[in-house]
Amino acid sequence: MDNREIKRSKKRMKARFGTDQLKHMGYTEDISPGGIFIQTVSVLRPGTMLQVQLTTNDDRQILFKGQVRWAKRVPPQLLRKLKAGMGVMVTEFIEGEDVFRSCLPGE
Protein backbone atom coordinates (compact mmCIF):
# COMPACT_ATOMS: atom_id res chain seq x y z
CA MET A 1 0.00 0.00 0.00
CA ASP A 2 1.26 3.46 -0.95
CA ASN A 3 0.88 5.98 1.87
CA ARG A 4 2.42 8.94 0.06
CA GLU A 5 0.25 12.05 0.01
CA ILE A 6 1.18 13.05 -3.53
CA LYS A 7 -0.87 11.28 -6.18
CA ARG A 8 1.15 9.28 -8.65
CA SER A 9 0.02 8.27 -12.09
CA LYS A 10 1.09 4.99 -13.66
CA LYS A 11 2.68 6.14 -16.88
CA ARG A 12 5.16 4.29 -19.09
CA MET A 13 7.35 6.52 -21.23
CA LYS A 14 10.76 5.95 -22.76
CA ALA A 15 13.42 7.73 -20.67
CA ARG A 16 16.93 8.74 -21.68
CA PHE A 17 19.12 10.31 -19.02
CA GLY A 18 22.62 11.18 -17.92
CA THR A 19 24.80 13.73 -16.18
CA ASP A 20 26.46 15.08 -19.36
CA GLN A 21 24.85 13.15 -22.19
CA LEU A 22 21.59 11.23 -22.47
CA LYS A 23 23.46 7.92 -22.62
CA HIS A 24 21.39 5.77 -20.23
CA MET A 25 17.96 4.31 -20.94
CA GLY A 26 14.95 3.18 -18.99
CA TYR A 27 11.20 3.63 -18.69
CA THR A 28 9.04 5.62 -16.35
CA GLU A 29 6.80 3.56 -14.15
CA ASP A 30 4.96 6.39 -12.49
CA ILE A 31 4.97 10.18 -12.43
CA SER A 32 3.82 12.85 -9.99
CA PRO A 33 3.80 16.67 -10.19
CA GLY A 34 7.29 16.79 -8.67
CA GLY A 35 9.06 13.78 -10.09
CA ILE A 36 9.22 10.37 -11.70
CA PHE A 37 10.35 6.82 -11.06
CA ILE A 38 12.66 5.49 -13.77
CA GLN A 39 12.96 1.73 -14.02
CA THR A 40 16.52 1.09 -15.22
CA VAL A 41 19.64 -0.97 -14.62
CA SER A 42 21.72 2.23 -14.99
CA VAL A 43 21.07 3.53 -11.48
CA LEU A 44 22.84 6.73 -10.42
CA ARG A 45 23.69 7.76 -6.84
CA PRO A 46 21.23 9.78 -4.75
CA GLY A 47 22.09 13.47 -5.00
CA THR A 48 23.27 13.20 -8.62
CA MET A 49 22.06 16.03 -10.86
CA LEU A 50 21.04 14.85 -14.32
CA GLN A 51 19.08 15.64 -17.45
CA VAL A 52 16.12 13.49 -18.40
CA GLN A 53 14.36 13.22 -21.75
CA LEU A 54 10.98 11.49 -21.82
CA THR A 55 9.18 10.43 -24.98
CA THR A 56 5.43 9.87 -24.83
CA ASN A 57 3.66 7.14 -26.81
CA ASP A 58 2.69 9.76 -29.39
CA ASP A 59 6.34 10.93 -29.71
CA ARG A 60 6.06 14.20 -27.77
CA GLN A 61 9.27 15.19 -25.96
CA ILE A 62 9.79 16.32 -22.37
CA LEU A 63 13.22 17.50 -21.23
CA PHE A 64 14.09 18.49 -17.68
CA LYS A 65 16.86 18.72 -15.13
CA GLY A 66 16.45 16.70 -11.98
CA GLN A 67 18.07 15.19 -8.92
CA VAL A 68 18.20 11.53 -7.97
CA ARG A 69 16.43 11.30 -4.60
CA TRP A 70 16.70 7.54 -4.03
CA ALA A 71 17.98 4.55 -5.95
CA LYS A 72 17.71 0.78 -5.85
CA ARG A 73 20.31 -1.40 -7.54
CA VAL A 74 19.54 -5.03 -8.25
CA PRO A 75 22.03 -7.74 -9.27
CA PRO A 76 21.63 -8.56 -12.99
CA GLN A 77 20.47 -12.11 -12.29
CA LEU A 78 17.52 -10.78 -10.22
CA LEU A 79 16.29 -8.11 -12.65
CA ARG A 80 13.32 -10.18 -13.77
CA LYS A 81 12.12 -10.61 -10.18
CA LEU A 82 13.03 -7.32 -8.49
CA LYS A 83 12.58 -3.74 -9.62
CA ALA A 84 15.70 -1.64 -10.14
CA GLY A 85 15.56 2.08 -10.66
CA MET A 86 15.52 5.52 -9.10
CA GLY A 87 13.25 8.30 -8.01
CA VAL A 88 14.07 11.61 -9.70
CA MET A 89 12.83 15.00 -8.51
CA VAL A 90 12.20 17.56 -11.26
CA THR A 91 14.21 20.74 -10.59
CA GLU A 92 13.77 22.62 -13.89
CA PHE A 93 11.85 22.01 -17.11
CA ILE A 94 13.76 22.76 -20.31
CA GLU A 95 10.95 21.85 -22.70
CA GLY A 96 7.62 20.05 -22.64
CA GLU A 97 6.37 21.06 -19.19
CA ASP A 98 2.84 21.30 -20.62
CA VAL A 99 3.17 17.77 -22.05
CA PHE A 100 4.38 16.48 -18.67
CA ARG A 101 1.49 18.14 -16.84
CA SER A 102 -0.99 16.67 -19.33
CA CYS A 103 0.19 13.17 -18.31
CA LEU A 104 -0.72 13.74 -14.64
CA PRO A 105 -4.01 12.50 -13.17
CA GLY A 106 -6.79 15.07 -13.30
CA GLU A 107 -4.93 17.32 -15.75
Image: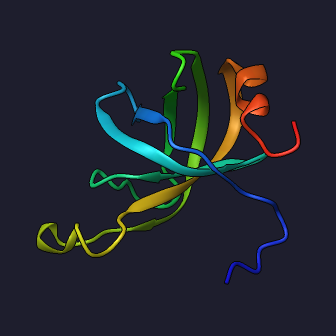
Taking the spot 29% from the left edge, 30% from the top edge, the residue there is: 23
What is the total number of numbered labels drawn onto the structure image? 0
Side of 84 relative to 38 (left or right) = left
Picture quadrant of residue 95:
top right
Q: Is residue 77 left or right of residue 43?
A: left
Residue furthest out toward the bottom: 1
Q: Position of residue 35 (x, y in %)?
A: 67, 48
Q: Say which residue appears at 85% left-offset and 70% top-offset.
A: 5
Q: Quadrant of the C terminus?
A: top right
- Residue 25, percent from left and from top: 32, 37
Q: Measured along the vertical axis of the image, is residue 59 above or below residue 7?
A: above
Query: With respect to residue 35, does 107 lie above or below?
Result: above
Q: Quadrant of residue 56?
A: top right
* Image-quadrant location for residue 60: top right
Q: Residue at x 38, y 27 (%)?
A: 20
Percent across and percent down for residue 58 are 54, 18
